[in-house]
Amino acid sequence: MTAPVVQSLREQIREHIVEGIVSGRWQPGERIVERRIAVELEVSQTPVREALRELESLRLIESAPNKGVRVRNLSAADLEESYPVRAGLEQIAAELAAEKLAVDCSALSPHVEALYVADREADGTGQVRHTVAFHREMVRAAGNSVLLHTWEGLGIEVFTALSIRWLGTVQQSYAEEHQALVEAFQNRDPDIGLLVKQHVLGCAPAPAAE
């Protein structure tokens, strides 16, 4: 029997900080005090420092000598930058996973069903969670660990949540768009890679007006 996956302490702390940023507990430009997080979570400062370092690599926070760590003032342009990269990766993933998902889409379908519920209830948190989970399963189905690692390194969940919260990038129906992708896989659509690419680019924040 396979043992359940247990999050490391660093991962738990990372999620705590991310949730604080996404929820607005820490506003853009606000300082995040390493020692306070350690006291609050009753942990040493070492795993907190590791989690902050990881979030800095995702460009969510920034540090400066004698100024500490602060939440980055992310602009629409900052959030937009990840979408073309993500779209290219997911196009490759869709093409690699096409045959596998044509035969079995069971890893994707539960997230589509959950998205119908989230859409109906206007549950923004659920929409983000299951949208990202759908795409993660699609990338995982490609069977390429380098591709999956690169995709996860983009911080998709955080940037999706921030795009919705800070820029109001809300789609009319998350469920219907993802159901259409499932059907394209099942129908062995030869343009599945392009369809996925266009889908991701369609989720990008609208460019700011001049």
Image (cartoon, rainbow, N blue to C red):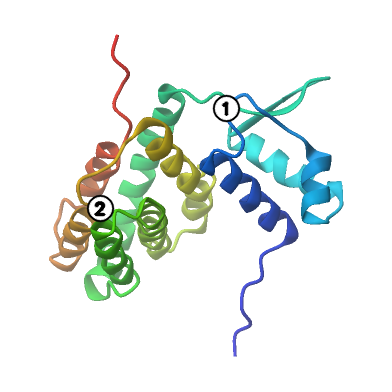
In front of the other: 158 or 42: 42
Q: Tell me if residue 161 comes above or below residue 5 in the rendering.
A: above
Tag 2: residue type?
Answer: Tyr
Name which residue lies at 22% across and 41% down. 198
Name which residue lies at 35% across and 40% down. 88
Upstream in the sequence, badge 2 or badge 1? 1
Q: Kindly state the secondary structure of the residue where label 2 is placed.
A: helix
- Residue 65 percent across, percent down from the top left: 81, 20
Q: Residues within 10 Å of mark 1 (few under 14, many from 20)?
A: some
Q: Tell me if residue 65 comes above or below residue 176 in the rendering.
A: above
Q: Residues within 10 Å of mark 2 (few under 14, many from 20)?
A: some
Between circles 2 and 1, the one closer to the viewer is 1
Name which residue lies at 68% across and 28% down. 70
- Residue 121 percent across, percent down from the top left: 28, 59
Task: Give the spatial CA distance, label 2 vs label 1.
Answer: 27 Å
In front of the other: 192 or 20: 20
Q: Examine the image and state in which quarter residue 2 appears.
A: bottom right
- Mark 2, residue position: 174
Tag 1: residue type?
Answer: Pro
- Mark 1, residue position: 28
